[in-house]
Each structure stands twice: as structure tokens, then as C-alpha cells.
Amino acid sequence: MMEALKAINTRRSVRKYKKKKVPKKIIKELINAARNAPSSYNEQPWVFITITDKEKLRKIAEPEEQKSNFLKDAPLVIACCYDEKKSSTKIHNLENVAVAAENILIAANALGLGACYVTAFTSKYPVIEKRIRKVLKLPGNVHPVCLITIGYPDEEPVDKEMRPLKEVWKKEEYV
Ligand SMILES: Cc1cc2nc3c(=O)[nH]c(=O)nc-3n(C[C@H](O)[C@H](O)[C@H](O)COP(=O)(O)O)c2cc1C
């Protein structure tokens, strides 16, 4: 297994996967990494739904607006949601799930998997959330934040230019 910093720094979005299934033991590791994330007031309001059913994935991937059609060919998708009944502060719900989602992305990389964060919640396209709700039979108190596509990589992640350290790192003050 990769060391933590290497897993963080080499993570890149992978959107094309081999057909090989992700073993249950590995899926368990991913969810375990997610549930160990920090959360506001330690409320851990998240719930993670693993989806491997092709028909379900096809239905979720359908909306044109999402531009994430690769979702239907992923061997595994994890819908990362929060349960509003388990959280006392609405304002932190997205953050809580997003930090847990990043844990999944890093753990996936460490385990030799490729993954991609796909937005499930967007006020611009409420149809996406609606579709996910229907397919996953989410109760009204459970809200999807993102879908993470996962599988054994079948593409080299695109090389991307990162903003330089000296641009993003300010010392003591902004200027
Ligand atoms: C909040 C958020 C939403 C994203 N939504 C999508 C998406 O809907 N579809 C997609 O293909 N990638 C999505 N991504 C992945 C980004 O495109 C990707 O992280 C970015 O281009 C940087 O590339 P990297 O992940 O390889 O470092 C999303 C990432 C984040 C953090």
C-alpha cells in the first residue's frame, strides 16, 4: 500500500475503468476510510450507498446535463449522502460529506483503483438529484452530495498543471 502523502499527491480523476469488479473487501476499506473523516460536532451525518447494478447506473447517468455519462460504465459508484436527521447544523452538511468523499478518493488511489468525484447536488440542475433520489429510493431526509465512480483504471489520468505553491501559499498575511 502507498504511503499517505504519495496517495494524496498522485491522486487524479480517472473516468475509464476495466470491467473487473471491485472486491467487497476493498469496498469495505473505502467506506471505512470515509467514515473516519472529520465532521462538524462529530455528528457523522453521512451515509454511503454502493451501487454496482448496471440498470441503476444507466438510469442515474441518463441526464444530459450531468455530462458524466462514464458513470454508467463504472464497476462501482458510491453515492455519498447526508441524513439531515443526524445533523444539527445545515450549513456544514455539504462540507461533512465532501471531506469524507476525499477520503474515498485518496483511499481508492492507495488501493490501486481509479476514481472520480461527480457532482450529485447542484442547484443548477435539480433534475439530477431528483433522478438519484428515485433510483436509490432515498427518503426525504437523505440528500445526495456526490457520486464517486470507482474501478480499476483503464486510462492514464490527464496530466494537469497545478497552481504553483508560491501563488496559493501566503505567509501570515494575504499580500
Ligand atoms: C465538487 C466537484 C465536482 C466535480 N464534478 C465532476 C463531474 O460532475 N464530472 C466529472 O467528470 N468530474 C467532476 N469533478 C472532477 C474534476 O473535474 C477534477 O477533480 C478536476 O478536473 C481536477 O482533476 P483531478 O481530479 O485529476 O486532479 C468534480 C470535482 C469536484 C471537486
Image (spheres, grey):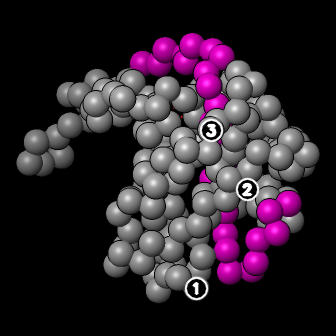
- The reply to whether residue 6 is in sight is yes
Q: Which residue is mark 1?
A: 85
Q: SS at mark 3?
A: loop
Q: Position of residue 98 (x, y in %)?
A: 49, 55
Q: SS at mark 1?
A: helix
Look at the image and give the residue range highlighted in magenta. 135-161
Give, as a three-letter code, the residue at label 2: Lys
Side (left or right) of 174 relative to 94: left
Q: Residues within 10 Å of mark 3 (few under 14, many from 20)?
A: few
Q: In the rendered structure, does residue 89 fall within the stretch colored magenta?
A: no
Residue 130 sits above or below residue 42 on the image: above
Q: Which of the two discs, 3 and 2, labels the residue nearer the N terminus?
A: 3
Q: Which of the two discs, 2 and 1, labels the residue nearer the N terminus?
A: 1
Give, as a three-letter code, the residue at label 3: Pro
Residue in view at x 70 percent, y 21 percent? 18
Q: Position of residue 12 (x, y in %)?
A: 49, 27
Q: Which residue is mark 3?
A: 23
